[in-house]
Protein backbone atom coordinates (compact mmCIF):
# COMPACT_ATOMS: atom_id res chain seq x y z
CA UNK A 1 0.00 0.00 0.00
CA UNK A 2 2.09 2.92 -1.25
CA UNK A 3 1.45 6.10 -3.12
CA UNK A 4 3.75 7.63 -5.69
CA UNK A 5 7.24 7.84 -4.15
CA UNK A 6 5.85 7.51 -0.61
CA UNK A 7 6.23 4.86 2.02
CA UNK A 8 3.33 4.04 4.30
CA UNK A 9 3.52 4.75 8.03
CA UNK A 10 2.62 2.15 10.65
CA UNK A 11 1.68 2.62 14.30
CA UNK A 12 0.61 -0.10 16.72
CA UNK A 13 -0.25 -0.95 20.28
CA UNK A 14 -1.35 -3.93 22.33
CA UNK A 15 -4.49 -3.35 24.37
CA UNK A 16 -5.14 -5.40 27.49
CA UNK A 17 -8.71 -6.29 26.49
CA UNK A 18 -10.43 -8.92 24.36
CA UNK A 19 -10.91 -8.13 20.67
CA UNK A 20 -14.70 -7.81 21.07
CA UNK A 21 -14.29 -4.90 23.52
CA UNK A 22 -11.50 -3.32 21.47
CA UNK A 23 -13.66 -3.45 18.32
CA UNK A 24 -16.64 -1.93 20.15
CA UNK A 25 -14.60 0.94 21.60
CA UNK A 26 -12.90 1.58 18.24
CA UNK A 27 -16.13 1.71 16.23
CA UNK A 28 -18.94 3.13 18.38
CA UNK A 29 -19.29 6.95 18.24
CA UNK A 30 -19.95 7.29 21.98
CA UNK A 31 -16.52 5.76 22.59
CA UNK A 32 -14.71 7.44 19.67
CA UNK A 33 -15.47 10.87 21.16
CA UNK A 34 -13.75 9.81 24.39
CA UNK A 35 -10.35 8.82 22.95
CA UNK A 36 -9.86 10.38 19.49
CA UNK A 37 -7.37 13.16 20.21
CA UNK A 38 -3.59 13.39 20.15
CA UNK A 39 -3.21 15.62 23.24
CA UNK A 40 -5.15 16.84 26.27
CA UNK A 41 -5.80 20.27 24.72
CA UNK A 42 -7.85 18.64 21.92
CA UNK A 43 -11.11 16.70 21.96
CA UNK A 44 -13.54 14.97 19.62
CA UNK A 45 -16.93 16.62 20.21
CA UNK A 46 -18.75 14.60 17.52
CA UNK A 47 -18.47 11.30 15.65
CA UNK A 48 -20.61 9.34 13.22
CA UNK A 49 -19.90 5.85 11.94
CA UNK A 50 -21.67 3.71 9.32
CA UNK A 51 -19.49 0.63 9.81
CA UNK A 52 -19.92 -1.34 6.58
CA UNK A 53 -18.14 -1.56 3.25
CA UNK A 54 -19.23 1.60 1.42
CA UNK A 55 -20.28 3.29 4.66
CA UNK A 56 -18.81 6.61 5.77
CA UNK A 57 -17.46 7.90 9.06
CA UNK A 58 -16.55 11.33 10.39
CA UNK A 59 -14.96 12.53 13.60
CA UNK A 60 -14.75 16.21 14.49
CA UNK A 61 -11.39 16.95 16.07
CA UNK A 62 -11.11 20.33 17.78
CA UNK A 63 -8.83 22.38 19.98
CA UNK A 64 -10.52 22.79 23.36
CA UNK A 65 -9.86 26.55 23.24
CA UNK A 66 -11.94 26.81 20.05
CA UNK A 67 -9.03 28.01 17.91
CA UNK A 68 -9.20 25.23 15.32
CA UNK A 69 -11.24 22.18 14.31
CA UNK A 70 -11.54 19.80 11.39
CA UNK A 71 -13.51 16.73 10.38
CA UNK A 72 -11.53 13.55 9.87
CA UNK A 73 -13.39 11.02 7.78
CA UNK A 74 -13.54 8.56 4.97
CA UNK A 75 -15.38 5.72 3.29
CA UNK A 76 -14.89 2.09 4.28
CA UNK A 77 -13.47 -0.23 1.61
CA UNK A 78 -13.34 -3.33 3.86
CA UNK A 79 -14.91 -4.27 7.17
CA UNK A 80 -14.24 -7.74 8.59
CA UNK A 81 -15.62 -7.77 12.14
CA UNK A 82 -12.98 -8.10 14.88
CA UNK A 83 -10.23 -8.37 12.24
CA UNK A 84 -9.88 -5.63 9.60
CA UNK A 85 -11.04 -2.12 8.81
CA UNK A 86 -9.83 -0.39 5.66
CA UNK A 87 -10.90 3.01 4.38
CA UNK A 88 -10.07 5.77 1.94
CA UNK A 89 -9.93 9.35 3.18
CA UNK A 90 -11.37 12.28 1.22
CA UNK A 91 -7.95 13.05 -0.29
CA UNK A 92 -7.66 9.43 -1.55
CA UNK A 93 -5.11 8.31 1.04
CA UNK A 94 -5.68 4.79 2.29
CA UNK A 95 -5.68 3.34 5.81
CA UNK A 96 -5.59 -0.31 6.91
CA UNK A 97 -6.28 -1.29 10.52
CA UNK A 98 -5.88 -4.85 11.78
CA UNK A 99 -7.07 -6.28 15.09
CA UNK A 100 -5.30 -9.43 16.31
CA UNK A 101 -7.01 -10.83 19.37
CA UNK A 102 -5.39 -13.37 21.68
CA UNK A 103 -7.54 -13.97 24.75
CA UNK A 104 -7.46 -10.82 26.87
CA UNK A 105 -5.02 -8.91 24.65
CA UNK A 106 -5.52 -7.35 21.24
CA UNK A 107 -2.86 -5.94 18.95
CA UNK A 108 -4.08 -2.97 16.89
CA UNK A 109 -1.97 -2.00 13.87
CA UNK A 110 -2.70 1.01 11.66
CA UNK A 111 -0.93 1.54 8.35
CA UNK A 112 -1.64 4.74 6.46
CA UNK A 113 -0.54 6.79 3.48
CA UNK A 114 1.16 9.98 4.67
CA UNK A 115 -0.03 13.42 3.57
CA UNK A 116 2.22 15.99 1.88
CA UNK A 117 2.04 18.86 4.38
CA UNK A 118 3.71 17.57 7.55
CA UNK A 119 6.89 15.52 8.05
CA UNK A 120 6.40 11.75 8.30
CA UNK A 121 7.79 11.67 11.86
CA UNK A 122 5.21 14.24 12.97
CA UNK A 123 2.39 12.29 11.34
CA UNK A 124 3.55 9.04 12.95
CA UNK A 125 3.78 10.72 16.37
CA UNK A 126 0.27 12.16 16.07
CA UNK A 127 -1.35 8.90 14.97
CA UNK A 128 0.56 7.01 17.68
CA UNK A 129 -0.62 9.48 20.33
CA UNK A 130 -4.24 8.93 19.30
CA UNK A 131 -3.69 5.16 19.37
CA UNK A 132 -2.11 5.46 22.83
CA UNK A 133 -5.19 7.41 24.02
CA UNK A 134 -7.38 4.63 22.61
CA UNK A 135 -5.39 2.01 24.55
CA UNK A 136 -5.62 4.00 27.80
CA UNK A 137 -9.35 4.67 27.42
CA UNK A 138 -10.17 1.06 26.53
CA UNK A 139 -8.12 -0.46 29.34
CA UNK A 140 -9.55 1.96 31.95
CA UNK A 141 -13.25 1.55 31.08
Image (tube, rainbow, N blue to C red):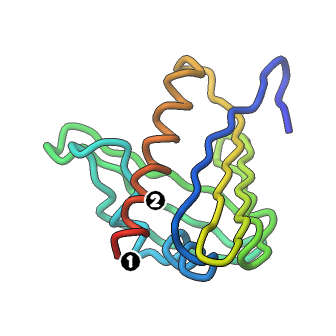
The residue wearing badge 2 is 135
User: Which residue is at a point 52% across and 41% down the rendered structure image?
Assistant: 127
Position of 93 with respect to 130 (left or right) is right
How far apart marks 1 and 2 lie (CA) works out to 16 Å
- Residue 87 picture location, percent across and down: 72, 57
User: Which residue is at a point 71% across and 72% down the rendered structure image?
Assistant: 102
The quadrant in which residue 93 appears is top right
Q: Which is more toward the observer, 32 or 137?
A: 137
Question: What is the quadrant of the N terminus in the image?
Answer: top right
Question: Could you tell me which secondary element the residue under label 1 belongs to?
Answer: helix
- Residue 17 picture location, percent across and down: 53, 73
Q: In the image, is residue 130 above or below residue 55?
A: above
Q: In the image, is residue 117 above or below residue 101?
A: above
User: Which residue is at a point 72% across and 51% down the rendered structure image?
Assistant: 88
Q: Residue furthest front?
A: 103
Q: Residue furthest left?
A: 65
Front of the two marks 1 and 2: 2
- Residue 14 picture location, percent across and down: 58, 57
Q: In the image, is residue 65 above or below residue 103?
A: above
The residue wearing badge 1 is 30
Question: Could you tell me which secondary element the residue under label 2 belongs to?
Answer: helix
Amino acid sequence: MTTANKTTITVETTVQAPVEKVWKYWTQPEHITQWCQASDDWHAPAATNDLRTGGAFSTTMAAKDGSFSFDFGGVYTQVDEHKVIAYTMGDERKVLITFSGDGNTTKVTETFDPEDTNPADMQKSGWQAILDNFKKYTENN
